[in-house]
Amino acid sequence: MSYSATRLIFAIAVTGLAAIPLAAQAPAKPLTVEAIYGHGSLIGHPPSGLIWSPDGKHLTYLDGGELVDLDPGTGKPHILVGHAKLATLSGAAASEADNDHRDRYKMASYLWAPDSKHLLFDSNGRLWMYDLRNGTGIQIGFTGAAAGDDPKFSPNGEFISFVRDHSLAVVHLKDTGTPMSAAAQSPNSGILNGEVDWLYLEELETRSNYFWSPDSKNLAYLQMNETDVPQYPIEDWIPTHAQVDLQHYPQPGDLNPDVRVGVVNTEGGKTMWMKVPIKPAVDYIPRFGWADHKTLWIETLSRDHKHRDIYFADAATGLAHLVLQIADDKFIDDGYDVSVGMGTILLTNWTDGNNHLYLYSYDEGKPETTTAKLERQLTKGDFEVGEVLRVDHHAKVVDYVSNEGSPLDRQLWEVSFGGERRQLSTGAGTHTATFAPNGSAYVERRSALMEPTKVSLCQAPDKSAGADSAARCSPVWSTRALEPYQLRAPEHLEVKAHDGTSLFATILLPEGTNPASVPLIVNPYGGPGEGTVANRWSEGILFDELLTQHGFAVLHADNRGTGDRGRAFAQAAWHNFGPIQLEDQLTVVDAALEKYPQLDKQRLGWWGWSWGGTFTLYALTHSDRFRAGVAVAPVTDWHNYDSIYTERYMSLPAEFPQGYKDFSVVNSAANLKGRLLLVHGTGDDNVHMENSVQFLQKLIEAGIPYDLQIYPRKTHSIAGAEVRRHLFNRIVAHFEEYLKPPVQ
């Protein structure tokens, strides 16, 4: 969508507009699958991918083929690089998988130069240096990749580096003709120098595997040797001659990529490998970086996810020593980010039962021998610290997101290294932010359960005014696109699990129904990670409303084993991938049936995606209460999924064979009750289609009928307006056919 599109309502356009009273509105407009999924987002597209220039004078984002700049002082938008200019920098169209990866993993398509006067555009592998002063662009490199090439400026702005052919390349901007050199050449496709593979990208949330030294003289990079990692074939059947993409994908018990960290000069030459004691092809290096221009810090994670260590290593000799250790008897939380500098280390962990911020110190003058000392736990209490947004070692402050005050909200907070805290955001809902380099301003994105994202530009509170001073925020973007639909808020439920733990849920009921006549559809995710019952906007709310317009009630609940509720709540999933989750969901279902007599306990349905799809199959094979289910992209055998994720909760197959047998739904397929619609994309590189094929084989052997929907080339997201319309119409039709009573 272009900057001028009328569906984008900027502050300058909405100032003074009052909300229209509901009583004065026309009758609610019915929702359709076409309206929700057929033309992009129904609410429009709030500015995303916002990037501050290094000098803090520009705040930019791409919109509809234009680069828009928001004035940091007023929030007013203007075009920095127009559509015509950007069109000349375009490259070849990216593949389905590349587009999915750029979207799913938030890969930037441009970045600011350190001088804040140039931009580097990455147009599907073609790198263009754009000069804002004269409006000209020069192609300075071709990476050969539409996604995952990870271009970067050196700190002094004299070089640009990127990944090409699994190697690190460096462009010399100051030299005539901007020559390119290979800093770390890969000998074959099984050796990735500085490149992030799928496993680290997805499961360790690694977004980059190489970093410039502060003095711009060296590059530190992670080498991943995937030679012995098994490969999975992803086949494309659309061409006359089918094509196969072989993906390195270690499954539980397989060899992992063999990883090590090296340092190489920008001109290339011999790499100095850091001597960090990890088990080859077993353990992980989730994060690393420069503590100073001579010293690296390197974080390691044991394969069983019980030991997280940080080392310091001498860049010149490779000698390394242990600085800090964290351990857990089940598994460590999966927040691996670390910030190191100026004698301090900042990280999160859940040692005290909740995820909190910890500050350590080390002797900056003796990095070759120092160890870390715990200075203080910066946050403490029965709440969770979520994303750490900014760490400023100079100003000694941390900006972060937390659910302190309400487990369903997410607020912005700031804490000093001395422990003084203050809340930056106001108002219920979910807040996150992108901070200017010096922290003086930030872009806030806020949403609530019934309020789509609103974007504001905020000036940070004046510290001299005291801890109670508030940020000054001006609206940048909001939408009124949903007003004609008059959406109804679901009701909140709090139900006690069998052990007394509070379970949070929401239920949305259709209007004007008779007693004991309403089918109920359960739609949990249920697996590890962020819960679905929270005070934030989700497109799923629209589909819930559509289902109620078809006469269904929709129930969401977060069971034990999901996140955001502390270590014990999350670790309920350890060696328990089904029973405790189903127990909690059925407890909430029973509470809902008791509270709302209009619900028909004989007409229950269930649907979910990914872990939620697996959960659908687990429920339909371990309970006879559900008449219909839809499973999208499910794992059906935990032997099939990747090593990092699965072993974190299930250990190695040899260590927990009974669990792999009992919790893999392929082994209970013969017990399937209710009518199943199974959905999968053939290009899914996350949950491979073999999962659905293996489950279907078991249904065939048991003589059980089923419905199947395949989406050619589509990845785990099954993205795109055409297929989304088709998919969600199929889901509605499935429940209409199998949950509604027969016509008399």
Image (cartoon, helix red, strand yellow):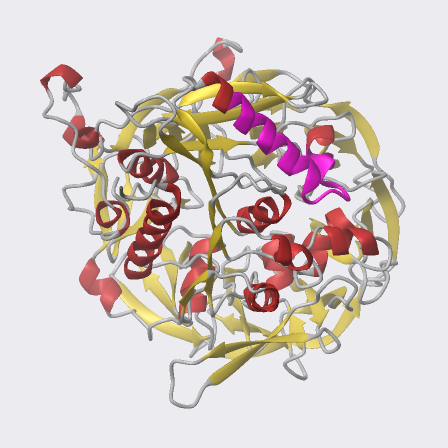
The residue located at (74%, 42%) in the rendering is: 576
Left or right relative to 737: residue 12: left
Q: Is residue 182 above or below residue 8?
A: below
Front residue (pair 549, 642): 549
**Location of residue 207 by image quarter:** bottom right
Q: In this view, does 193 lie above or below 72?
A: below
Magenta span: chief secondary structure: helix
The total of numbered circles placed on residues is 0
Left or right relative to 639: residue 55: left
Front residue (pair 361, 337): 337
Q: Is residue 48 rendered magenta in the image? A: no
Q: Position of residue 389 (x, y in %)?
A: 54, 36
Q: Is residue 580 rendered magenta in the image? A: yes
- Regarding residue 342, the answer to whether it shows in the image is no
The residue located at (38%, 85%) in the rendering is: 239
Q: Is residue 159 above or below residue 526?
A: below
Q: Where is residue 273 in the image (x, y as percent from the top left)?
A: 80, 67
**Location of residue 736 by image quarter:** top left
Left or right relative to 64: residue 286: right
**Location of residue 342 by image quarter:** top right
Left or right relative to 596: residue 301: right
Please, which residue is most extreme toward the bottom here? 241
The residue located at (32%, 44%) in the rendering is: 742
- Regarding residue 383, the answer to whether it shows in the image is yes
Front residue (pair 603, 87): 603
Q: Magenta segment, which residues?
A: 570-592
Q: In this view, does 71 lie above or below 191?
A: above
Front residue (pair 273, 565): 565
Q: Position of residue 328 (x, y in %)?
A: 83, 38
**Could you tell me which quadrant the C terminus lies in?**
top left
Q: Where is residue 500 in the image (x, y as percent from the top left)?
A: 69, 18
